[in-house]
Image (cartoon, rainbow, N blue to C red):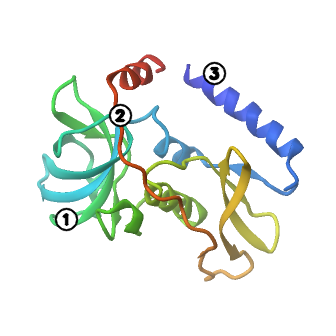
């Protein structure tokens, strides 16, 4: 199923590039960014606050589910590596990719955590995490849109690098920077959509699990 899905995505991207007026568009989202914004490698992506942390477990208070299944307000994470949580301390705000352990109330981390500036998705800015440059800009957009927008593409072929979000209407540029200056910072040139109320249903969760 996973290979079939990736093949379909690759064919769709090829068709887009052939027919796109942006002929210099080079790549869709990278493997890590794609896996961190999709439902395949985690049950839920949540934003909230670290309540406590030891070498054996991390207790987290969820403020909002950005992607996937509903979670308890207080989450106990018992399976993670030190590198996945190395930037975090009690009282920090974070975005976590979680997998439920054996249908229990315990969770594991599927990706390294992102330390952010706020538990409110629309206000959060990434402080620390594994993604860099355009990928980090895109993931911050994913967070700020409350997970509503997760399909990104990049153009690094010209003098200006551009990050795009892909919508039904086509590609929309969301950030840019000069690629010929090593210390150039990214400039956001658009704003993400407002967050919509969370909606969960048992059949959506079931269909999502069956699609694996």
Mark 1 or 2, nearer chain start: 2
Q: Quadrant of residue 14?
A: top right
Q: CA distance from mark 2 to mark 3?
A: 20 Å
Q: Which mark is residue 89?
A: 1
CA separation in Å, label 1 and label 3? 40 Å
Residue situated in front as seen by the camera: 111 or 98: 98
Residue bearing the label numbered 3:
4
Residue at horizontal 56 percent and vertical 19 percent from the top: 1
Residue 187 placement (x, y as % from top left): 61, 77
| Residue that label 2 marks | 43
Q: Is residue 179 left or right of residue 183?
A: right
- Neighbor class of circle 3 (other Cα within 10 Å; few <14, some 14-19, many 20+) is few
Q: Say what secondary structure mark 1 lies in.
A: loop
Q: Please say if 22 is above or below 31.
A: below
Secondary structure at badge 3 equals: helix
Q: Earlier in the sequence, mark 1 or mark 3?
A: 3
């Amino acid at each position: 199923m996973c290979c079939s899905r990736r093949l379909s995505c690759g064919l769709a991207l090829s068709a887009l590039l052939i027919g796109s007026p942006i002929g210099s568009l080079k790549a869709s989202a990278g493997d890590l960014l794609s896996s961190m914004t999709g439902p395949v490698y985690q049950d839920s992506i949540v934003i909230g606050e670290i309540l406590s942390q030891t070498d054996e477990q991390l207790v987290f208070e969820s403020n909002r589910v950005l992607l996937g299944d509903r979670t308890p307000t207080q989450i106990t994470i018992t399976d993670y590596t030190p590198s996945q949580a190395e930037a975090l301390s009690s009282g920090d705000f974070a975005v976590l990719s979680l997998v439920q352990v054996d249908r229990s109330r315990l969770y594991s981390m599927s990706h390294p955590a992102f330390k952010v500036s706020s538990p409110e998705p629309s206000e959060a800015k990434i402080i620390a995490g594994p993604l860099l440059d355009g990928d980090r800009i895109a993931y911050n957009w994913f967070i700020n849109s409350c997970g509503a927008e997760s399909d990104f593409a990049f153009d690094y072929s010209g003098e200006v690098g551009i990050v795009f979000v892909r919508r039904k209407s086509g590609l929309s540029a969301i950030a840019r920077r000069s690629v010929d200056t090593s210390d150039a910072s990214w400039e956001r040139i658009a704003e993400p959509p407002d967050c919509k109320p969370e909606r969960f249903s048992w059949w959506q969760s079931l269909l999502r699990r069956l699609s694996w």
